[in-house]
Image (cartoon, grey):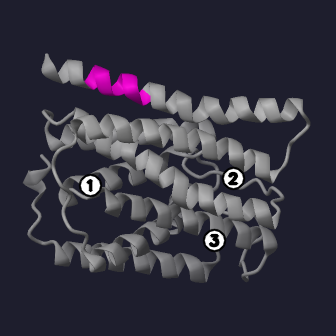
Amino acid sequence: MVHVKNTAKFLGWFIVIFLLAGALPIGLKIIFSAFELNNDITAFTSDLVGYVVSTAVLIRLIKKKSTAAEDTADKLFCVFICVFFMAYPVAYYTIARLIFGGNSPLIPSYIEEYQSILGFAFSIIKNAMLIPVMEELLFRKLCFLQLENMNAAAKIFLSGILFAAAHLPSGFYIGDTVIAGLLLAVIYFLTNNLFYCILAHSAHNLFAVMINRLNYERLIPWDYNLDLYVYPTWLSVLCIAAAIAAGTAFAVRYKKIKVHKIL
């Protein structure tokens, strides 16, 4: 009964935060539009207000319940997770395309959109700084605190699935977000340190934004001229190797971690 009550409470707060983070920016953008103020600055301001308010609410919720101190961050592990989370999306889409071809819901098509330099800078701030902090507080910290009586596998599964589901309305594809959500949940469970999750999430988003921009500007030599998710051979090979190396390094360094801790 306690599990059901805590799960319902967490899902309630999840919906509130999710709606708050979405409704505030949309509402502000509508107001700005009414005054014909549609530009990069007003768009960023709207997003900033939404994420800051949502983060503030999350911190207040977490402070009421959180008592345990987080473990000290391992600098070498920080390097591992940054490399892995920057490399695995390219590795994932490359392998998925080889297996399924181009016609699969697991592989999105890139829609090229113009973005000014100012808009690009704001995109980096939003995706690599604001979003990772808010989402990790919600999907990892609050989730694990509220569901403290559940076993690890249940918390990891719920965190990962909710993370993927929340990204569907934004056009993200299920394969990438499921992998990211589950991996971030595992990292948080094993390390008891949200800093790792925020860092990994930031590295992932920053690399995605940079690749997006490089593809738009054609600043690196692409082998194909189709879409963002058909990467040049050299980049695919490099990222697959980097993801394997970073994952192996983590496994070796943390060989003391056993699967039964999760199950």
* Type of the residue with mark 2: Ser
Task: Tell me which numbered mark, 1 or 3, is placed earlier along the sequence.
Answer: 1
**Given this view, does label 2 or label 1 mark the residue nearer the observer?**
1
Q: Which residue is disc 2 drawn over?
A: 109
* Type of the residue with mark 3: Tyr
Q: Which residue is disc 1 drawn over?
A: 188
Measured from the top left, where is residue 101 in percent x and y?
60, 57
- The magenta span reads 7-14
Category of crowding for the residue at label 1, using alpha-carbon neighbours closer than 10 angstroms: few (below 14), some (14–19), many (at least 20): many
Q: Which residue is disc 3 drawn over?
A: 231
Contact (CB < 8 A) between labels 3 and 2? Answer: no
Asked whether the viewer can see residue 21, the reply is yes
* Disc 3 secondary structure class: loop
Q: Residue furthest right?
A: 36
**Given this view, does label 1 or label 3 mark the residue nearer the observer?**
1
197 and 174: which is toward the camera: 197
